[in-house]
Image (cartoon, grey):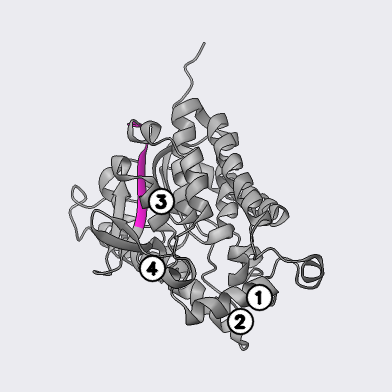
Amino acid sequence: MAERAPRPLVNLALQGGGAHGAFTWGVLDFLLEDGRLGFDGLSGTSAGAMNAALTVQGLVEGGAAAARAKLATFWGRIAEAFERSPLRPNPIERFLFGHDLTFTAGYLALDALTRTLAPAQFNPLDLNPLRDILEDLIDLKALHGCTQYRLFVSATNVRTGRNRVFTEKEVTIPALLASACLPHLYRAVEIDGEAYWDGGYMGNPALWPMFYRCTAPDLVVVEINPIHRPEVPDTAPEIINRINEISFNTALMAEMRAIAFVQKLLDQGAVDPARYKRLFVHSIHAEEAMARFNVSTKFNGDAAFLAELKALGRAAARAWLATAFDKIGRASSVDLRARYL
């Protein structure tokens, strides 16, 4: 019997975006089910960090099936928590607004609260349902004992404004919470005497660790925040939504510009290929579909909405793999200049 060829390895960069991270769940679910690709490094921010950590833990404990189950359990727990959330819309609001929470009573109350009070004032006990979910599902021993996969979790240092990337044994429950800490909702997470906020401000997600710590030449970015929009926003909610998208894409755009520059120098023979890595870049996204969901829906953990996002993610991964699989290890499947420059 002929030996089975080894699977090509890719590095995964997983964006954050609250409940929209269920799109990434769908992408991972399909890639794990398909099985033609293996993973080298996974870098994630916020919801992307949760997805990355749970995927690595599942792979370590029981392979692709266990990783898929771990992700499904996590997002199921998110949906259960939302059922008890004051943000949960009532039946009339659900009928009128669908997945959009912008004009629901709970979301309007939260918006007013966070504009006048700091998290230490309206949440003095620092309650965070995500903490309980992660403590139940994350096995730090399994994560810290993993040698097959590289894991990178990004957070923003409040004092220095720099991106902090937690790696392997540095990834803890506080590190994951720091990566998803929105400053208007939660107090900064203290780790080793430093305060951290959401990693999306400085790295959504961080790409550079995979250049230096991983060997796979392919970088697959799973994007959930639309980069391009054809229309100019003209209402207050639309403006806020677009500001949020641009803000949380800024670091990614900057890193992609740097990658494009280095690849151009390599093409021109202007730099030493022994010192600078040849990268093949790929992007999985459903920009047009995700653009329908505004910033308020990132707080919507309704099970039906999460299932819709998961389905979008699976469809996007299937479409990408159908056209890009033959390019893995040989060429990029995204035009860096057209998309990011």
Tell me the quarter of the picture where residue 9 sits. top left
Residue 27 seen? yes
Tell me the quarter of the picture where residue 140 sits. top left
Q: Return the residue at label 3.
A: 176
Tell me the quarter of the picture where residue 231 sits. bottom right
* Mark 4–mark 1 distance (CA, rounded to whole Å): 23 Å
* Mark 3–mark 1 distance (CA, rounded to whole Å): 27 Å
Q: Residues within 10 Å of mark 1 (few under 14, many from 20)?
A: some
Q: Return the residue at label 2.
A: 237
| Mark 2 and mark 1 residues within 8 Å of each other at the beta carbon | yes
Q: Disc 2 marks which amino acid?
A: Pro
The disc label shown at residue 336, or none: none
| Quarter occupied by the C terminus | bottom left
Q: Return the residue at label 4.
A: 201
- Which tag, 4 or 2, sits closer to the chain's start? 4
Where residue 206 appears, as percent x and y from the top left, is: 35, 57
| Mark 4 and mark 2 residues within 8 Å of each other at the beta carbon | no
> Which segment is the magenta one?
146-154
Q: Return the residue at label 1.
A: 102
Query: Residue drawn 44% across and 29% down?
Result: 60
Query: Closer to the camera, 295 or 188?
Result: 188
Q: Disc 3 marks which amino acid?
A: Leu
Q: Tell whether 170 sits left or right of 90.
A: left
